[in-house]
């Protein structure tokens, strides 16, 4: 399955990320395991998960009032996959963003994960589909935008939801999709934060095949 979404800002990874549009625990089919092989039950559990933007995709954050569109050319997330569970948890160790900006040079914004570790719960819904939900995390967005000014916002990763898909076919190594995820501004030091912000594009995939199993 592709674990994506991380532009998931705890995803903004976190992440990112993560849309980590979650299913309720009642939809899960028993315990969840991220697996190296397409076996059920899992015979080769994943231990260290490394995700990056899917080739040909960018991370895109859209804000309104003021209207800004921030593109990131790089999103990298790495985390330890914890023991089998329902849900299974991923403990993020790193969530990095690069080449971010509102300009053509992608150079006028800094996005930084202020709170790490980030815990992400993953639920197996069956048939190679799942959901992931951020449990904590804070991401800083700091931009100097022409004609608008200095925009500084902080977003929480708690409650962010993402779609998850197993490796195979158009899903590549697996997929985590954060598109459509709305971000909650928790204040921050800035006065020009958008009233609403949404991840319009954020597709992450692991470096090697990942399957949703149990």
Image: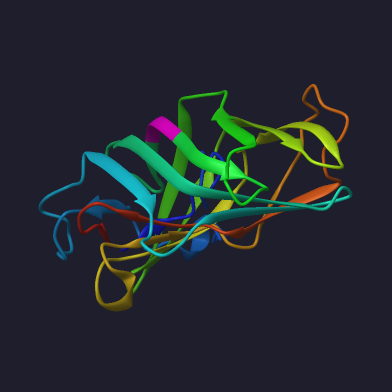
Residue extent of the magenta highlight = 91-95
- Image location of residue 168, percent across then percent down: 24, 73
Q: Residue at x 84, y 34 (%)?
A: 149
Q: Residue at x 34, y 35 (%)?
A: 79
Name the image colouring: rainbow
- Res. 214 image quadrant: bottom left
Q: Residue at x 66, y 48 (%)?
A: 103
Q: Is residue 151 magenta?
A: no
What number of labels is visible? 0
Magenta portion: prevailing SS class = strand
Q: Nearer the viewer, residue 125 or 196?
A: 196
- Image location of residue 166, percent across then percent down: 30, 66
The answer to whether residue 180 is visible is yes
Q: Is residue 197 above or below residue 93?
A: below
- Res. 189 image quadrant: top right
* Residue found at the very far bottom of the displayed protein: 169
The answer to whether residue 137 is visible is no
- Image location of residue 180, percent across then percent down: 64, 62
Q: Residue at x 59, y 34 (%)?
A: 111
Please identify the quadrant where the N terminus is shown.
bottom left
> In the visual, does 162 lie left or right of 210?
right
């Amino acid at each position: 399955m592709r674990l994506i979404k991380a532009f998931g800002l705890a995803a903004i990874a976190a992440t990112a990320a993560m849309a980590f549009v979650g299913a309720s625990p009642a939809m899960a089919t028993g315990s969840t395991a991220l697996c190296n092989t397409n076996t059920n039950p899992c015979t080769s559990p994943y231990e260290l998960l490394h995700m990056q933007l899917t080739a040909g995709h960018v991370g895109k954050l859209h804000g309104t009032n003021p209207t800004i569109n921030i593109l990131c050319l790089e999103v990298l997330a790495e985390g330890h996959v914890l023991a089998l569970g329902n849900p299974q948890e991923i403990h993020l160790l790193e969530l990095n963003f690069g080449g971010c900006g509102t300009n053509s040079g992608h150079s006028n914004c800094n996005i930084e994960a202020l709170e790490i570790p980030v815990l992400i719960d993953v639920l197996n819904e069956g048939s190679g589909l799942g959901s992931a939900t951020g449990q904590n995390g804070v991401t800083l967005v700091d931009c100097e935008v022409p004609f608008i000014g200095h925009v500084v916002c902080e977003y929480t990763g708690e409650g962010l939801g993402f779609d998850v898909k197993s490796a195979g076919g158009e899903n590549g190594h697996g997929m985590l999709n954060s598109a459509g995820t709305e971000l909650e501004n928790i204040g921050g030091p800035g006065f020009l934060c958008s009233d609403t912000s949404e991840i319009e594009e954020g597709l992450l995939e692991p470096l090697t095949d990942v399957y949703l199993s149990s």
